[in-house]
Amino acid sequence: MNNSEIKKFRLGELFCGPGGLALAAVTAKISNPEYKIVHQWANDYDMDTCNTYRRNICPDNEESVICGDVRKLDIESLGDIDALAFGFPCNDFSVVGEQKGFNGTFGPLYTYGVKVLKRYQPLWFLAENVGGLKSANEGKAFEKIQKDLIKAGYKIYPNLYKFEEYGVPQARHRMIIVGIRKDLPYEFKIPSPNPYKGIDVTCKTAIEIPPIPKSAPNNELTKQSAQVIERLSYIKPGENAFTADLPERLRLNVKGAKISQIYKRLDPNKPAYTVTGSGGGGTHIYHYAEPRALTNRERARLQTFPDTYIFEGSKESVRKQIGMAVPSKGAKVIFEAILNTFAGIPYESIEAYTGCDD
C-alpha cells in the first residue's frame, strides 16, 4: 500500500506513561471512520506505569508494552509503525525544576525518539514536553530538538497548547510538536480552541459531576496531620500557604523561593492549577471546600481520565503516574487534527504560538 493511502495508523510510543496519549489516540474519531489510530507497541521504565498502560490500553496484548530503560531498548526489534508518540521526560526542561536542559540526566532522552524516527520513518509523530522547553538552555535546547527532528526527515509544527482552552479542567501548558514526513503532501494546522469555548472547565464541575462513587478505584483519602488540617482551614480557595493569613504557629519556615502551589487550595470557579507527579508536604493539590488533599481519582478527573481507568501500584505511585500523564481530552484534539489532515478534511485552525510560558 502506498504510504499516502494508509488510514489505520499503527502507533509506537516511547515514555508512554500510564496511557494518557494512548487513550487520546485510540479514541480519536473523525467524520471518516476509516481513519483511526491503533496501539502497536509502547515503552516505559516504571513497572507500575507499564501495568496501568497494559490494563487499560492493551489488555489482550500485554507483551506489546516493553518495560525497561529506553537507553537499553533494542530499537531494531520494536517493529514497524506508521506513527510515533513520545512525551519525553520533562524534569530538566520544567520551569518548576532547575531547568538544566541538556545538562541534566533526562534532557538527552529525546534523542531516542529521533532514533526511532530515523529507523522506522513513520508517517507522522507527536512529541510532547513542558512549556518551559522553549526557554531551557537559553532557548538552545528547543532549537536543537527542532533541528534534529527536521534532520530525521520531517516537517515540524510546534505549538504551545493551553489545555484549559481545549476543554480540560486544568491550566496545563505543553509544547507539542507534530511532525509529518517530508515526502508526504500534507500540511498540519494547529487546531483552534474555538469549538471548546462553551465547555465548563471549572475544577468543581470536573470533580463533582457526576459524583465519584465512594467505591471508585484509586479514591483513597490521604492521611493528614491535625496541623495540616488546621492550616488548610485558614487557607481560602485560590490561596496558598504564603498568601493566606496564617497564625504564626502554622506558617511555613521556608528560605529562598516560595513556590505558589504549596498548600494551594483550588478555586472552584477556575480550572485547576497544574497536576504534578511528585513533591513532598504541601504539593498534593487541595480541595476547595474540604480541608484535605485531593484523592488520586479526583486528580485523574482533572487529567480527564474516565473513572473506569484503573491505575496500578501504591497510592504514591499512582499519584506520580497521574501527574506525569498527558490529559487525554486535550491530546485527542491534536490526534483528531492529524487524522483530519491525512483524510483531507478541513478543520478550524489558528496560527502557531511557541512563546514562553509555564
Image (tube, grey):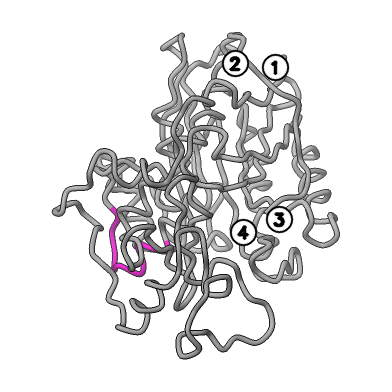
Q: CA distance from mark 2 to mark 1?
A: 7 Å
Above or below residue 71? Residue 300 is above
In this figure, which residue is indicated by the disc labeled 2? 342
Q: Earlier in the sequence, mark 4 or mark 3?
A: 4
Q: Earlier in the sequence, mark 2 or mark 1?
A: 1
Whether residues under marks 2 and 4 lie with C-beta atoms below 8 angstroms apart, the answer is no
Which label number is shown at residue 186?
1
Looking at numbered disc 3 in the image, what kind of residue is underneath it?
A: Gly
In this figure, which residue is indicated by the disc labeled 3? 132
Residue 32 in picture, x, y percent from top left: 46, 9
Residue 132 in picture, x, y percent from top left: 71, 55
Whether residues under marks 2 and 1 lie with C-beta atoms below 8 angstroms apart, the answer is yes
Describe residue 250's horizontal placement relative to residue 189 as left or right.
left
Residue 30 drawn in magenta: no
Whether residues under marks 3 and 2 lie with C-beta atoms below 8 angstroms apart, the answer is no
Q: CA distance from mark 2 to mark 4?
A: 29 Å
Q: Which residues are magenta?
A: 311-320
Q: CA distance from mark 4 to mark 1?
A: 29 Å
**Callout 1: SS:** loop
Which label number is shown at residue 90?
4
Describe residue 145's horizontal placement relative to residue 327 as left or right.
right
Between disc 3 and disc 2, the foreground one is 3
Instruction: Please name the predominant secondary structure of the magenta segment in the image.
Output: helix
Above or below residue 210? Residue 183 is above
Q: Earlier in the sequence, mark 1 or mark 3?
A: 3
Q: CA distance from mark 4 to mark 3?
A: 9 Å
Looking at numbered disc 2 in the image, what kind of residue is underneath it?
A: Phe
Between disc 4 and disc 1, the foreground one is 4
**Callout 4: SS:** loop
Residue occupying the point 55% across, 59% down: 70
